[in-house]
Image (cartoon, rainbow, N blue to C red):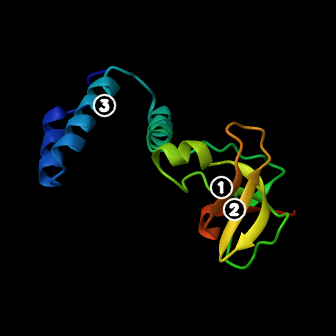
Amino acid sequence: MGNIDFDWVKAQLTEAKVRRGAGDAVLALLKEWDKLSLEDELNREAVSIFGRLALGHALVSENGNEVWVSVIPGQLKVADVVRIKFNAFDGKLGKVHNGRVGVVTAIRYGDIIVKSTDGKTPAIDGSHYSPYHLEKLSKK
């Protein structure tokens, strides 16, 4: 506890010309962070997880039996199993879509239309995605 040098932090924020609202948020978060006592490894993990969740990015646990690869336009076909990338969208859209698994039901004008198969709510049916937002389940 008490390991953060707030004078240094304020100087960094000033030198980097961080906007006031963002700077104030950082200072508030660091004040709470300063109350915790975590080992360095847990610090890094907590920061990584917090950053992802704060932006609405999904925490995707990897199954050792599955290999997911980024999609290249033209690579997908109907019935392929896809996953929306964990960071495809920010905010509210990210909370609904990121990390979801589904099947390709159609491809129109470059959009990939997906129906969710992961059993999560809300169900996704007919959502259009850019191929750059998707990963494909690869056969091992």
Badge 3 element: helix
Q: Is residue 31 above or below residue 116?
A: above
From the viewer's perspective, is 3 left or right of 45? left
Percent x, y for residue 34?
A: 30, 25
Separation of residues labelled 2 and 1 (CA atoms):
6 Å
From the viewer's perspective, is 6 left or right of 37? left
Between 138 and 94, which is closer to the camera in this rendering?
94
Q: Residue drawn at (46%, 37%), measured in percent from left and top?
A: 50
Q: Residue drawn at (49%, 39%), measured in percent from left and top?
A: 53
Q: Residue drawn at (84%, 50%), measured in percent from left and top?
A: 65
Do we see residue 56 in this rendering? no
Callout 2, which amino acid?
Glu
Q: Which residue is mark 1?
A: 84
Percent x, y for residue 9?
A: 19, 40
Q: Tell me, for residue 135, which label it has, or none.
A: 2
Find residue 132 and report its image quarter.
bottom right
Do we see residue 23 in this rendering? yes
Percent x, y for residue 93?
A: 52, 48
Q: Which residue is mark 3?
A: 29
Find residue 78 and report its image quarter.
bottom right
From the viewer's perspective, is 63 left or right of 23? right
Callout 1, which amino acid?
Ile
Q: Quadrant of the C terminus?
A: bottom right
Q: Mark 2 vs mark 1: which is more N-terminal?
A: 1
